[in-house]
Image (spheres, grey):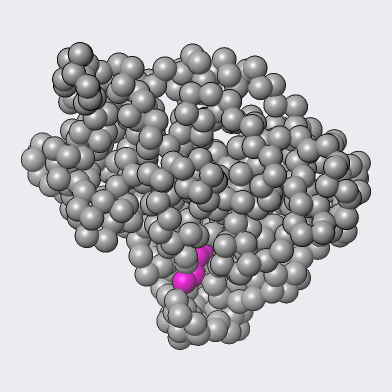
Amino acid sequence: MSTESSSTPIQPIRFFHRGKIVDVSGVHPTRSVLDWLREDARCTGTKEGCNEGDCGACTVVIGELATDAHAPGAVDGLQLQTVNACIQFLPTLHGKALFTVEDLKGQCASQCKPKTEPPAKHAVHPLHPVQQAMVDCHGSQCGFCTPGFVMSLWATYEHHQAEGTQPTRQQLADDLSGNLCRCTGYRPILDAGQRMFDLPAVRLDTAPVVAALTALKNDGLDYAAPLGARIDHFHAPKTIAQLAALRVQKPGAQLLAGSTDVGLWVNKQFRDLGDIIYVGDVAEMKTVEERADELYIGAGASLEAAFGALVERVPSLADVWLRFASPPIRHAGTMGGNVANGSPIGDSPPVLMSLDAQIELRRGDTVRRMPLPEFYLDYMKNQLQPGEFVQGLAVPLDAMRRQVRAYKISKRFDCDISALCAGFAIELEEGGDTVKAVRLAFGGMAATVKRAAHAEAALVGKPWTQASVATAKLALAQDFKPLSDMRASADYRLQVAQNLIQRLWLETRTQDALSLEETSVWSVMPHVVAKVAAEGL
């Protein structure tokens, strides 16, 4: 923040909305996309429910130029992804396209034949297939959540139309896991998700959007707006070198990635953030690739991209990936941010610790690494020095060859905060049942995410048997003294943690191990069971 004169030149926020480039100036950097839509643009179809990214009533779709035509979410030159408008700050739209429920009407107006032919005074255009399917299947009752559901379904519709596929019912349920309905119920909405592909297709014409975004030539944003007597800045560097220099110059500025946590600081805690440095436009920070003997995950890579890469190599992590928050949160939030934030109930750190991940920190031109467990010092305290930031995460490929499991325990199955989360990895001596190496990492059991050193020691060098597991479960009480809170009691947390070690043994024992299909809830979802019974699978 500064006290510069308000005459300081201000670079406008520029993005594509409702068929044209929009220039916005004068709004505070922490103004949400939702507030701008409803109060400034007067696009009131997008609703405010929880105002913290949980309910999905404010779901919109963000479009960016696709760097990879075959990447998940790519649609004819655009990358389309759902996000929660209530926690996204308006300047993060710079150089992007914003789609809301109002755009669906525009699509039909240009592609669908009106129900009333001219010269009638008021031609009524048909609904978009997503909307018509919701009507046909009685997928809306009070209607408040409906625009959010429609936008999530629209993103699914565009993705599958581009690929020439149709989603399964379970895939639809996964795509809608960030949208809550309190009166209609989910069956008719899932019905609508299937029905929309039976109607005449209406596709997004991406050409004008791609042309507009290309013309914008987003070279970074330095935006500023007054707040009383001071001016707050929103810096969006384009390269990692620019980010490093800016961070040294402004060590007290608030770093922002997906704003899935920081957005709540503003909406719920009314925090004054001052100057902001946004890392979301730094392409180098979004890298997810194999380098020599490791999988490197840039700190700006989305949770969806990061977990997708991990699951590709370790399929047993699929459950915790799909249950991590919701698609809109995973599209916006980053794994680097989840780690750097240091929440003791974060779901990424236990998984990464079980895989011996290292965290990469940078200050200026100086880069250093350390094992992830060493990064955390105490509750919400870490090893970051002034002017330093998290640049990436490195996961050894060898660690992913172990037997790896991750378990999330929460009150709701989808879109909920963990009571505890566990990341486990075990390696047995070749041809035997002796434990060669084991990692037992827990979130929700202490002031920080940490490994269970005593329980691990009780297993290493011992036979992987029920007796050894019993010893490790007892040792767990030496590792953790969990707290009681609204999500779980201390006794419950300890007992569940012990039970999860038992589950690990059941799934990885040398004889009669339970398969992932036998222990995964996905295999017993009611509609999946019905499909299996109907098709005789």
Q: Can you tell which quarter of the image residue 10 is in?
A: top right
Q: Pinpoint residue 514: horizontal percent, then vertical percent.
A: 32, 56
Q: Which residue sits at x=61%, y=69%?
A: 269
The span shown in magenta is 419-423
Q: Nearer the viewer, residue 391 or 81?
A: 81
Q: Pinpoint residue 31: horizontal percent, then vertical percent.
A: 61, 51
Q: Which residue sits at x=49%, y=82%?
A: 485
Vertical arrangement, residue 431 with respect to residue 108, above or below: below
Q: Which residue sits at x=88%, y=48%?
A: 5
Q: Is residue 431 visible?
A: no
Vertical arrangement, residue 332 with respect to residue 451, above or below: above
Q: Examine the residues drawn in magenta and state their main secondary structure.
A: strand
Q: Pinpoint residue 426: horizontal percent, then vertical percent.
A: 54, 57
* Count of numbered circles in the view: 0
Q: Pinpoint residue 344: horizontal percent, then vertical percent.
A: 60, 69
Q: Is residue 236 visible?
A: yes
Q: Nearer the viewer, residue 235 or 404?
A: 235
Q: Can you tell which quarter of the image residue 479 is in?
A: bottom right
Quadrant in which the N terminus appears: bottom right
Q: Which residue sits at x=48%, y=56%?
A: 53
Residue 68 falls left or right of residue 517:
right
| Magenta segment includes 478 | no
Q: Nearer the viewer, residue 446 or 341?
A: 341
Q: Nearer the viewer, residue 129 or 354?
A: 129
Vertical arrangement, residue 484 with respect to residue 310, above or below: below
Residue 284 falls left or right of residue 365:
left
Vertical arrangement, residue 426 with respect to residue 9, above or below: below
